[in-house]
Image (spheres, rainbow, N blue to C red):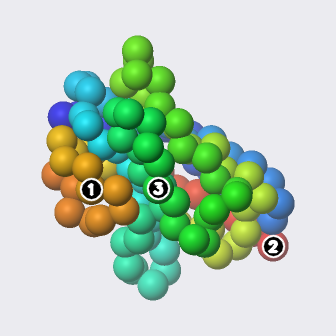
Amino acid sequence: VQLVESGGGSTQTGGSLVLACTASTRPKCMGWFRQGTNNKREGVASIENDGSTSYADSVKGRFTISKDNAKNTLILQMNSLKPEDTAMYYCAADDFKLQLARHYKYWGQGTQVTVSS
């Protein structure tokens, strides 16, 4: 599975950004992870083919994950962004329902999100 990410960039506190990830196949589960200055990769949100979603507590109510199954494209709408959301964001995919577990098999190259105060 190849994953190609787009979107990201820079914004100020309270701003919005959208990330997209197009997969070469239709995995059973896809998710977004991020790695900030602490160098720890954490799960942000995931979605399964049946539409079930999972979110990290830190982004609930601010981020929305969705998937266009016809285009095999994963979307992450990020609203009310905070400086602590600054990180490299990675798209991930797997044929197991891993939710926010980190051992996804397939990973994108990452896209930077920077939120300034």
Q: Is residue 18 left or right of residue 107?
A: right
Occupied quadrant, residue 27: top left
Q: Is residue 64 above or below residue 54?
A: above
Q: Quadrant of the N terminus?
A: top left
Q: Is residue 23 left or right of residue 69?
A: left
- Which residue in the rendered view is the most extreme toward the bottom? 38
Q: Is residue 62 left or right of residue 52?
A: right
Disc 3 target residue: 54
Amino acid type assigned to the residue bearing label 2 in the image: Ser
Q: Comparing marks 2 and 1, which lies closer to the viewer?
A: 1
| Circle 1 SS class | loop
Is the residue under label 3 in contact with that under label 1 (CB below 8 Å)?
A: no
- Graded by Cα atoms within 10 Å as few (under 14), some (14 to 19) or many (20 or more), the crowding at tag 1 reads some
Q: Mark 3 to mark 2: distance in Å?
A: 28 Å
Disc 2 target residue: 117
- Graded by Cα atoms within 10 Å as few (under 14), some (14 to 19) or many (20 or more), the crowding at tag 2 reads few
Is the residue under label 2 in contact with that under label 3 (CB below 8 Å)?
A: no
Residue sitting at 64 percent across and 75 percent down?
84
Amino acid type assigned to the residue bearing label 1 in the image: Leu
Q: Comparing marks 3 and 2, which lies closer to the viewer?
A: 3
| Circle 2 SS class | loop
Mark on residue 98?
1
- Which residue in the rendered view is the most extreme toward the top? 70
- Please report whichever mark, 1 or 3, sits nearer to the chain's N-terminal start: 3
Residue sitting at 47 percent across and 56 percent down?
54
Amino acid type assigned to the residue bearing label 3 in the image: Ser
Occupied quadrant, residue 30: top left
Is the residue under label 1 in contact with that under label 2 (CB below 8 Å)?
A: no
Residue 113 vs residue 91, the one in the foreground: 91
Q: Mark 2 to mark 1: distance in Å?
A: 34 Å
Residue 107 appears in view: no
Residue sitting at 52 percent across and 67 percent down?
56
